[in-house]
Image (cartoon, helix red, strand yellow):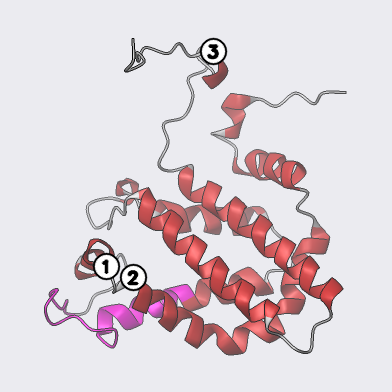
């Protein structure tokens, strides 16, 4: 039997959206348990992972430039692009935020409404919907960064000598599901929600093929 999904509610009810995504990708309490177990392997490596992420972001001017803007919650003196380093105070602040995010992601035992709101805020704070102080990152950079973080975590699991192949498979699948869900919670704040009288599947195409 086909289950009805309310397309409008998907954009306005975070729990409803999460429940739909969880059913679709088969994300369950077993995946959360796998992440909790993985925490003992990942958390000691968080400083190295975080440093690798920001070193990657510093390799491109298009991503490094976002760090000269004031991040919400940072009250210190900002370094400009020329003087900014990975050890600058504003970077230490951001590293601490990413470290806290990763620790919470792996230690969270129940995905409560408060935790879902936290994952949503992580996405929202990167858009212009948080006010003038927002860094307003283009989604292409968000997608690339999340993909890179997932790649680093996959490498940790793959190289863990104390884990058997079955456990590694469960952990890798859990990681994949989690980052697909988190990516969606970012994308939620970048897309315009569907109108009640115009669901996506009924929208008319107005563009013309270049060959016509």
In the rendered view of the protein, which quadrant contains the N terminus?
A: top right
Does the stretch in magenta take in 128?
no
The residue tagged with tag 2: helix, strand or loop? helix
Q: From the image, state whether disc 3 or disc 2 is nearer to you.
A: 2
Check residue 202 in the rendering and tell me which mark sits there, or answer none.
3
Magenta segment includes 88? yes
Q: Which badge, 3 or 1, is on the more N-terminal residue? A: 1
Please state the extent of the stretch shown in magenta in the rendering: 77-98
Left or right: 107, with 54 as reference point: right
Callouts 3 and 1 close, C-beta under 8 Å:
no
Q: Which residue is mark 2?
A: 57
Cβ atoms under marks 1 and 2 closer than 8 Å: yes
Cα distance, mark 3 to mark 1? 40 Å
Position above or below: 189 against 86: above
Q: Residue 126, can we see it?
A: no
Question: Which residue is situated farthest in the front direction here?
Answer: 211
Q: Nearer the viewer, residue 159 or 47?
A: 159
Q: Residue at x 66, y 59 (%)?
A: 176
The label on residue 194 is: none
- Asked if 141 appears above or below 102 in the picture, the reply is above
Q: CA distance from mark 1 to mark 2?
A: 6 Å
Residue named by callout 1: 60
Tell me if mark 2 has few (under 14), some (14-19) or many (20+) residues whose alpha carbon lies within 10 angstroms of its own. Answer: some
User: Which quarter of the picture shows residue 158?
Assistant: bottom right
Q: Element type at marker 1? A: loop
Q: Position of residue 55 (x, y in %)?
A: 35, 79
Q: To which quarter of the image does residue 96 belong?
A: bottom left
Q: Earlier in the sequence, mark 3 or mark 2?
A: 2
């Amino acid at each position: 039997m086909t289950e009805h999904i309310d397309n409008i509610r998907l954009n306005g009810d975070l729990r409803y959206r999460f429940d739909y995504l969880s059913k679709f990708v088969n994300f369950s309490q077993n995946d959360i348990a796998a992440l909790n177990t993985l925490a003992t392997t990942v958390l000691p490596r968080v400083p190295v992972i975080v440093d690798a992420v920001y070193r990657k972001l510093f390799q491109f001017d298009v991503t490094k430039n976002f760090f000269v803007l004031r991040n919400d919650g940072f009250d210190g003196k900002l370094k400009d692009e020329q003087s900014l380093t990975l050890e600058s105070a504003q970077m230490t602040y951001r590293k601490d935020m990413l470290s806290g995010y990763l620790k919470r992601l792996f230690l969270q035992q129940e995905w409560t409404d408060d935790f879902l709101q936290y994952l949503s805020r992580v996405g929202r704070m990167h858009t212009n919907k948080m006010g003038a102080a927002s860094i307003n990152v283009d989604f292409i950079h968000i997608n690339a960064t999340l993909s890179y973080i997932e790649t680093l975590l996959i490498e940790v699991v793959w190289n863990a000598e104390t884990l058997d192949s079955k456990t590694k498979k469960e952990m890798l699948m859990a990681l994949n599901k989690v980052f697909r869900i988190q990516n969606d919670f970012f994308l939620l704040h970048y897309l315009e929600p569907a109108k009640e009288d115009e669901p996506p599947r009924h929208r008319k195409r107005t563009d013309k093929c270049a060959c016509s």
